[in-house]
Image: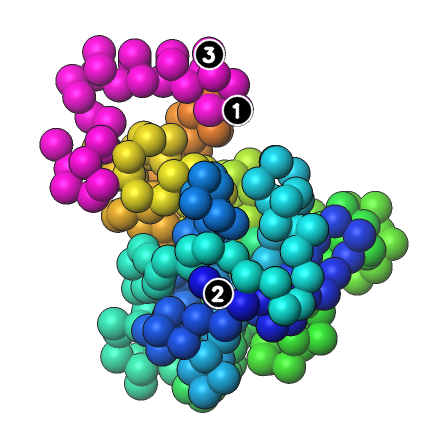
Amino acid sequence: MFEIVKKRMLNNDIMLMNIKAPRVASGAKPGQFIIIKLDEKGERIPLTIADYDKKEGTVSIVFQPVGQSTIELAKLNEGDFVKDFAGPLGRPSDFLEEDLEEIKKESIVFIAGGVGAAPVYPQVKWMKENGVDVDVIVGSRTKDLLILEEEMKAVAKNYYPTTDDGSYGFNGRVTDCLKDLIDNQGKKYDRAIIIGPVIMMKFAAMLTKEYEIPTVVSMNPIMVDGTGMCGACRVTVGDEVKFACVDGPEFDGHLVDFDEAMRRQALYKTEEGRAKVKDEDKKAGGKQCGCGGAHK
């Protein structure tokens, strides 16, 4: 059993919980995720690690109560327990394997949309802790929907909030802000890391491709099962079939077939859609990952 040691609302729709899980916290790295189950019969919920404290043995998760399982999770309070909290899962961010001194020579921009600010935060925090200054663009529809602002300001060199309605920060989308920084403010970026809704990542990656900025995106939003069993997170990257939960969740943003990913994401919202995807996978030659990570 895993105790909820902290619970707070980040805005009217999004919640943060700190879970006591020393083993998970000790091995956690930016870019990874966990799977949480409320009880023995509960649904497996994959959630990106939003922060971790190895000393305290806690892991932070951020979620929006939309389905039955996350609605039930939101009803729990500090001192309550969840049945399972498995992780860390997925591949850590690629930059963790790179030469730190070379990273310090780069100009890096992180771009987050909505709840995407949660998985962006531990990556930017890692950069700060290792002496790398980065810019961060965070977008939402309105000011009230922005999350983790103070935390992000503390670790980013430059923090650029954007709102679609112009109620706060830059008036426009994250892509508009990036264009403004490059075209009007003379910014030049060597790398972009983009996390958020799939449609946002698609258009942001299209823009960075125009500027010839190498780009990484996280396909965490399309994960359902978190083990490769369901096939929901199947995504085409270049000429290869990948699964976000076992091969990712991070991929080259200029190679991801976002349209395919969005179609599968929409289909998996209904029973009929899930059956259709499974049938298509069979017709495609058994490319569905049904072996918990050992790809067929």
Picture residue at 46% right of the left edge, 55% below the top: 83
What is the residue that sits farthest to the right in this orientation? 167
Q: Nearer the viewer, mark 2 or mark 1?
A: 2
- The first of marks 2 and 3 along the sequence is 2
Q: Is residue 281 visible?
A: yes
Q: Secondary structure at mark 1?
A: loop
Identify the image quadrant of residue 168. Answer: bottom right
How many numbered marks does the figure carry? 3
For label 1, count other residues whose C-alpha is less than 10 Å away and answer few (under 14), some (14-19) or many (20+): few
Question: Residue 28, percent across and down?
Answer: 37, 71
Going by the numbered disc 2, the residue's amino acid type is Phe
Q: On the picture, is 39 further left or further right than 31? A: right
Q: Nearer the viewer, residue 124 or 243?
A: 243
Going by the numbered disc 1, the residue's amino acid type is Lys
Picture residue at 51% right of the left edge, 49% below the top: 38
The residue that mark 3 highlights is: 272
The residue that mark 2 highlights is: 2
The residue that mark 1 highlights is: 269
Q: Is residue 178 visible?
A: no
- Residue 244 colored in magenta in the image: no
The Cα atoms of the two marked residues, 2 and 3, are separated by: 35 Å
Residue 102, compared with residue 232, is above or below; it is below
Question: Residue 138, percent across and down?
Answer: 65, 59
For label 2, count other residues whose C-alpha is less than 10 Å away and answer few (under 14), some (14-19) or many (20+): some
The Cα atoms of the two marked residues, 1 and 3, are separated by: 9 Å
Q: On the picture, is 213 further left or further right than 151? A: left
Q: On the picture, is 149 further left or further right than 55? A: right
Going by the numbered disc 3, the residue's amino acid type is Glu
